[in-house]
Amino acid sequence: MAKKFYLTVAIPYVNAAPHLGHALEFLQGDVIARYHRLLGDNTLYLSGSDENSLKNVQAAKKQNISTQQLCEQNTQAFKKLLKKLNISIDIWQRGSSQTKHWPGIRELWQCCQKSGDIYKKKYQGLYCIGCEEFKREKDLVNGRCPEHPHKKLEVVEEENYFFRLSKYEKQLLQLIKSDKLQIIPQKRKNETLGFIKQGLEDFSISRSVERAHGWGIPVPDDDSQIIYVWYDALAEYITGIGWNWGLKKFHQWWPAELHIIGKGINRFHTIYWPAMLMSAGLALPKSVLIHGYITVDGRKMGKSIGNVVDPLELVKKYGTDAVRYYLLKEIPTTDDGDFTEKRFKELYNADLANGIGNLVQRLARLCQNSGANFPKNKLQAYQKPGQTKKFIDNYRFNEALAHIWTYIKSLDKKIDQTKPWEKSGQDLGKILSLLVPEIQQIGSYLTPFLPETSQKIQKIFAGPKIRAPKKPLFPRLK
Ligand SMILES: [Zn+2]
């Protein structure tokens, strides 16, 4: 029976249109989803919109539209990006879904309540709307949130519901140390362990209706309180697959094999979320993969700096697979990386135009001119063990691509050495019939990364007659 593989990327706030960081995360998820489908696994890939946050309320006010309108508008922008980047997402869950999200959240709440993990308490704290989180004194740098130093923290004093996180301290430590809940890479695992060892404090999981501006999901049996946005958004991972509205489906998919997130929200996914699930008596995700941030020209991307890169503009200018290639190759999978348009063009010309594009054109033309017939091969590169596969299994996509490019270079060299243009008749047919399966293999290796290019290559070299494409796969940039 086929294995199942359920993966998610983070549920983005839809307070603005998506930026390059979102594109990177969707792509990382897409590589894994496509790879598992190639292996024959039953694969499900989910993301969704985080709609019930204060950020959205504020952004809507600024634009003078309703919060619902803002959510619609930006959800559409996200969906457009998914399409343009060729992201094979299966489910887009919405925080505003009153049938497929709200009842699930309220049931999750009630499950935690039954475990004795929810209680009411008067509280005073500093709230960062950027993070949608209360900050502890020790989290602050110069009295500000390190992620949002330009935003002033809000002093909040109110009676909220709290979640008994402290109760799960020992269990969490054990789960993470033993890799039962695997955190990748190691440095992020250490970060989580370090945080737990400081001692876990219970956290607020509701806010007053006034502070929420009436926006969000009311607490069961207490309309004066709205469920905290993180408690709400994290649960999209389960409500999206049927928690509480399609339990058969839910049990078929849960727990997730993998959550992919950015480093800024590590704590929510490796501490809060597993504790909530344990409290509700639900299974835990198997692993969490954590990527870094993208800087632009060496600087943090931000509206105030004016260097926000629109991934849709990039796709329009350079094409889907070129953008996929840059983000997957140039940004190390679990580290920070930089984007510059200059580097983009360099990489495009070197690896795409002169690399794979040129190789395909060259070999196809030789095949076409030979007039030979070629066998109809259908290759699947990842069925057998190999270095590229190993890199993907270890979530090192940039290294997997670097490895595929060594094949590309070595095939180019082989053509140089065997000099098919000096041969004819049977000799020529023989040489080419050894080279063609290699490019087919490369095409297959590219499937998770550059699906369109992979398809084109496999089509061109499918046999029996091979024709060179009229236009190069990647026209050179000036
Ligand atoms: Zn913050």
Image (tube, helix red, strand yellow):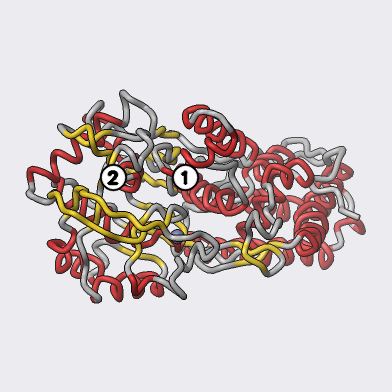
Q: Under tag 1, what secondary structure?
A: helix
Residue tagged 1: 55
Quadrant of the frame with the N terminus:
top left
Residue at horizontal 38%, vertical 36%? 213
- In the picture, measured across the screen, residue 345 lies left or right of residue 273, that is right
| Whether residue 430 is situated above or below residue 338 in the rendered picture | above
Q: Under tag 2, what secondary structure?
A: strand
Q: Which mark is residue 439?
A: none
- In the picture, measured across the screen, residue 212 lies left or right of residue 272, that is right
Whether residue 221 appears in this view of the structure is yes
The front one of 28 and 78 is 78
* Kind of residue at disc 2: Arg
Q: How many marks?
A: 2
The front one of 79 and 140 is 140
Where is residue 284 drawn, in percent x and y? Answer: 23, 52
- Classify 10 Å Cα crowding around label 1: few (below 14), some (14-19), many (20 and above): some
Residue tagged 2: 207
Where is residue 305 drawn, in percent x and y? Answer: 68, 60
The front one of 204 and 406 is 204
Residue 350 occupies which quadrant of the picture? bottom right
Whether residue 386 appears in this view of the structure is no
Residue 109 occupies which quadrant of the picture? top left
Q: Earlier in the sequence, mark 2 or mark 1?
A: 1
Residue 376 occupies which quadrant of the picture? top right
- Classify 10 Å Cα crowding around label 2: few (below 14), some (14-19), many (20 and above): many
* Kind of residue at disc 1: Lys
Residue at horizontal 18%, vertical 46%? 282
Where is residue 117 drawn, in percent x and y? Answer: 12, 51
Q: Residue furthest top?
A: 99
Where is residue 397 drawn, in percent x and y? Answer: 55, 61
Quadrant of the frame with the C terminus:
bottom right
